[in-house]
Image (cartoon, rainbow, N blue to C red):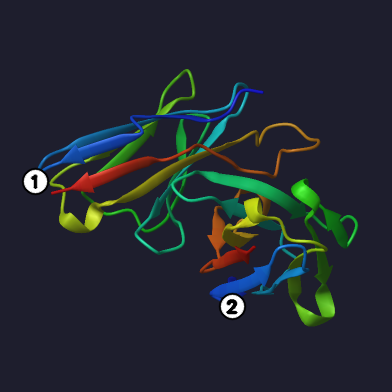
């Protein structure tokens, strides 16, 4: 069965310092992987996606993620955190059925950014 | 660019009442997904439709039903509401037909917050 594990439920960084949000996946095939961000009382916004092209994926707002098959990881990074980055981040995999499947969400990582 | 529209944005109901949530996908998107996000939880897949036919089913209670109409909008009907149904309900749309950039990506609406009292 396919699953997504976000290793940290809460990450706190200072403004201007790097951000690392960790995600591991389990799948019998190479899935499509996504990072979505959810600001308080807002909907889900797509940050970036990996679909078996380049392993280093660049997204919006300076975020990027690297797909590492050997480690089954898809960690999200940003060189310098901004106060507006404070939000909940979800690592997501495409569900069974390949490109037609539903999304499988990780439990989410809440990112706090201190001034 | 047009986004997914959900209505209403907020809904308050009493126990045992019914509720209908509506979703209008991005133009030319042929697939609609419904997700339920409980307080402090990750979104859980409920059901999806492709070209007006149900394509996949997740953890949707029997009290809930949904359909996709000829204009591709979708409605989630919820009956005999329970306190535990209080959640944020997301709709996402995707253009499955055809090829190219974006056909594998689900775009989410802002959600409908349902509160059952």
Residue B33 x, y percent position in the rendering? 49, 42
The answer to whether residue A93 is above or below residue A20 is above
Most distant residue in the top direction: B71
Residue A25 x, y percent position in the rendering? 66, 73
Q: Is residue B20 left or right of residue A61?
A: left
Most distant residue in the front direction: A115
- Residue A59: tell me if it is visible: no
CA neighbours of label 2 inside 10 A, class few (<14), some (14 to 19), many (20+): some
Query: Spatial distance from mark 1 to mark 2, Cα to Cα?
Result: 38 Å
Residue A29 occupies quadrant? bottom right
**A84, B23: nearer the viewer:** A84
Residue B41 occupies quadrant? bottom left
Subunit bearing disc 2: A
Subunit bearing disc 1: B
Residue A40 x, y percent position in the rendering? 47, 51
Residue B105 x, y percent position in the rendering? 67, 44
Q: Quadrant of the N terminus of chain A?
A: bottom right
Q: Secondary structure at mark 1?
A: loop
Say the numbered circle drawn on residue B16: 1
Taking the spot 25% from the left edge, 36% from the top edge, the residue there is B11
The answer to whether residue A28 is above or below residue A62 is below
Q: Which residue is mark 2?
A: A8
**B68, B45: nearer the viewer:** B45
CA neighbours of label 1 inside 10 A, class few (<14), some (14 to 19), many (20+): some
């Amino acid at each position: 069965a396919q699953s997504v594990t976000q290793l940290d439920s809460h990450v706190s960084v200072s403004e201007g310092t790097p951000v690392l949000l960790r995600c591991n996946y389990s799948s019998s095939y190479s899935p499509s992987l996504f990072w979505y961000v959810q600001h308080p009382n807002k909907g889900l916004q797509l940050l970036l996606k990996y679909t078996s092209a380049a392993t280093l994926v660049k997204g919006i707002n300076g975020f990027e993620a690297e797909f590492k098959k050997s480690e089954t990881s898809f960690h999200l990074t940003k060189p310098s955190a901004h106060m507006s980055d404070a939000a909940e981040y979800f690592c997501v995999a495409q569900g069974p059925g390949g490109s037609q499947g539903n999304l499988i969400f990780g439990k989410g990582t809440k990112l706090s950014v201190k001034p | 660019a047009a986004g997914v529209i959900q209505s209403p944005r907020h809904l308050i109901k009493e126990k045992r009442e019914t509720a209908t949530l509506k979703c209008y996908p991005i133009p030319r998107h042929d697939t609609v997904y419904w997700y339920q996000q409980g307080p402090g939880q990750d979104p859980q897949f409920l059901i999806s439709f492709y070209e007006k036919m149900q394509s996949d089913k997740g953890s949707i209670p029997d009290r809930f039903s949904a359909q996709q109409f000829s204009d591709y909008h979708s409605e989630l009907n919820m009956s005999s509401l329970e306190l535990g149904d209080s959640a944020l309900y997301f709709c996402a749309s995707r253009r499955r037909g055809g090829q190219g950039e974006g056909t594998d990506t689900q775009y989410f609406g802002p959600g409908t917050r349902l509160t059952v009292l």
